[in-house]
Image (spheres, grey):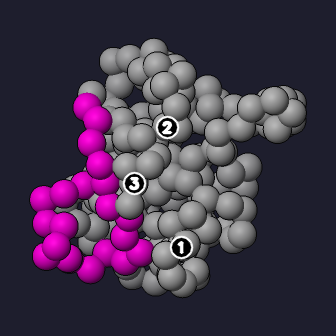
Amino acid sequence: MSEFAVNLVADLEPRTDIVGQVSVYVPSLELFSGPFARDAVTFPLCNGNQVTIDQLKSGAGPAPKNCYCGIFVLDPFLNWGKLAELLHAAKFKGICNFPPLPDFDGEEERALFASEYSFEKEMTQIKNYAGDAFEMLISYSNDEQHKSARELLAGSNGRFCHVDSIR
């Protein structure tokens, strides 16, 4: 398990500027323009998982060697079986919890927890999704999440990256 920085990519075209570096495929980036696209995809402004599925169905791929597919892991409507087939067909290295569940505290955190949305549930779900088929790239927001993820995913095939290191 290691930590490092990664690049967000909106398409699977080979890029000479990031050859050999780890990237996360988030095609919904193309829905937003300018320097705020990275932040915009972290808000529920679109169904990012469906955008990914649609792009992969339309023939996007194959994924570059070190590319993970970004998914909103806690999407209650995600058909993992369908997405997993598409990810295998596109030859993704693994999956990444991007966008991650926002890091809230206080009232917002209690509301998310009451709705069964928590970082721990996100980690359990991504571990279940990855199984033995995909590597995991785990994005986290703070030291507590990092520690929790390391404990919950001990022995798993995972790597870690602070969400601020995803650019």
Residue count near mark 3 (Cα–Cα under 10 Å), binned few <14, some 14–19, many ≥20: some
Three-letter code, disc 1: Ala
Q: Residue at x 54, y 22 (%)?
A: 144
Magenta span: helix, strand or loop, mainly?
A: loop
In three-dimensional space, the C-alpha distance between marks 2 and 1, rounded to whole angstroms, equals 19 Å
> Which residue is at the front of the view, 101 or 85?
101
For label 3, the residue is 166
Question: Which of marks 2 and 3 precedes in the sequence?
Answer: 2
Residue 88 seen by the camera: no
Q: Amino acid at mark 3?
A: Ile
* Label 3 – label 2 distance at C-alpha: 10 Å
Q: Position of residue 94 (x, y in %)?
A: 34, 49
Residue under label 2, please give it.
Answer: 140
Quarter holding the C terminus is bottom left
**Category of crowding for the residue at label 1, using alpha-carbon neighbours closer than 10 angstroms: few (below 14), some (14–19), many (at least 20):** some
Which image quarter is the N terminus in? top left
**Horizontal side, residue 74 vs residue 52: left or right:** right
Element on which disc 1 rests: helix
Q: Is residue 100 visible?
A: yes
Callout 2: few (<14), some (14-19), or many (20+) C-alpha neighbours within 10 Å? many
Q: Nearer the viewer, residue 94 or 143?
A: 143
Q: Give the side of residue 119 with respect to residue 7, left or right.
A: right
Magenta region includes residue 18: yes
15 relative to 89 in the view: left or right: left
Amino acid type of the residue that numbered disc 2 sits on in the rendered structure = Tyr
- Residue 40, x across and y down, in percent: 61, 68
Mark 1 lies on residue: 37
Q: Which residues are magenta?
A: 2-22
Query: Is 113 placed above or below 31 here?
Result: above
